[in-house]
Amino acid sequence: MRDQPTFLHLDLDAFFASVEQRDDPKLRGRPVIVGGTAGRGVVAAASYEAREFGVRSAMPTIQAERLCPNGVFLPPRFDAYQKASRAVMKIMSSVTSLVEPLSLDEAFLDVAGAMRRFTDPHAIAEFMRSSIKNEVGLTASVGGATTKMLAKIASDLAKPDGVLIVKPGDELGVLHPLPVGRLWGVGPATRERLDRFGVKTIGDLSRIPEATLVGALGAANGKHLHALSWNRDERGVQPDQQTKSVSHEETFSEDKTDRKELQRELVRMTERVGARLRSAGLAGRTIQVKLKYHDFRQVTRSATLDHLTDLAGEIGPVARDLLEDLEIAGGVRLLGVSVTGLSSEGEREEQLSFESGADLENRETRRALELAVDAVRERFGDDSVGPGSEIDNGRVRADRKGSLYGPLAEPEQPRPQSRRGRERDPG
């Protein structure tokens, strides 16, 4: 534990929903729910206006609709969220190189080395928040403390759009009154065991001898939670943590039994995965396809290439072959594709330096084409261009909730805001 609160945790407020409200002023002040808009989808993010109705992340969409019937239900736009995330990460990296991203919308920072440029951690937090608001158009909450664990808790307490820096000596006063579920590692099963000891708060937990916790929870978990209850957390910020996989999966509104339709869905997903790999400067070797059946059974199949790739044109054929080996009788509820075994763009280029001939030329031609598609989507939207398999008589298939493209495409219509067709305009 440090003697100054130089661990910061920055968390964007209601990230996906806030991006939607930023990009469409008509949505500001309205309950916005992002996620699967079909009956079996789940909520990925809810604006604070929607949370007032009890809507929460990971809630089934159908339950969210009952709680918030006038909400604006939107499908996710991951490319827009990734673009905003990159801009925010760039701002954090301007403060310190010690940034540990946890997801698109949150990261830890070690700002000990930045104290020469700023008066204190609070000034650093306010600098980042104002930069994010002015440059990205989003709000963020920041927590600071002498440990990573407490910095994360502090950012939660600061929400929305606030800062909480826990001063040295005040840690236990902030920590001990909180519910024990605030600690990392306390899930429903652990909480049920702790209930037997009358543990409701972190302070209650701190008063139980470590040996008792070890007996109840096991050596690793018991020692870990006892240490956290006293704000003992020796972990540092790990800026070199790499993304382990890039994936895209979707739960369908109805079980799919048509193999050709699943193949079309898979093509679209591999396009997205390839774009995300290129955007992140990553390439991978192992391609995996995942199916979840109507009865919730789940199967995966994978194959490993002899080279790194970030191209949908190489990922797609492998994924389609994997799908061909899987049964679809009874119906497919969820389909997903992922790329693992990731390496940096530099390693991909180093690999290419050992290749020659037609294969290299074809691969680089394909890469130039996919980069051009990335540029078009960046400017005109995710659905402005896509694979031909998505076009039916010159129009994008009706279940693709995006812009129309193709030779017979009509002028762009407003994106549907919910599966019930509610209007965006207030009143």
Image (spheres, rainbow, N blue to C red):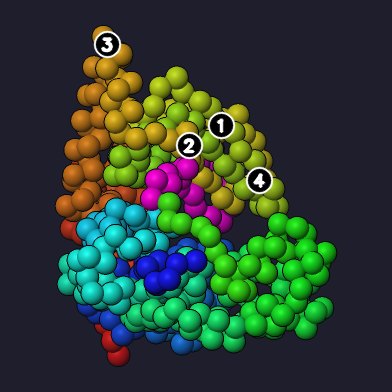
Q: Which residue is mark 3?
A: 356
| Residue 242 image position (x, y, % from top left) | 42, 44
Q: Which residue is mark 4?
A: 298
Q: Secondary structure at mark 4?
A: strand
Q: Nearer the viewer, residue 367 or 344?
A: 344
N-terminal-most mark, 2 or 4: 4
Q: Which residue is mark 2?
A: 340
Q: Is residue 170 above or below residue 351?
A: below
| Residue 198 image position (x, y, % from top left) | 78, 83
For the residues labelled 2 and 1, say whether their Cβ atoms are less than 8 Å apart: yes
Q: Secondary structure at mark 2?
A: strand
How far apart are labels 2 and 1 at the CA level?
10 Å
Asked if the magenta segment contains residue 244, the reply would be yes
Q: Residues within 10 Å of mark 4 (few under 14, many from 20)?
A: some
What's under tag 3, amino acid-wise? Ser
N-terminal-most mark, 3 or 2: 2
Q: Which residue is mark 1?
A: 302
- Closer to the camera: disc 2 or disc 4? 2
Note whether residue 132 is visible.
Answer: no
What's under tag 2, amino acid-wise? Thr
Q: Residue extending furthest front?
A: 3
For the residues labelled 4 and 3, say whether their Cβ atoms are less than 8 Å apart: no
Q: Secondary structure at mark 3?
A: loop
Magenta region: 239-263
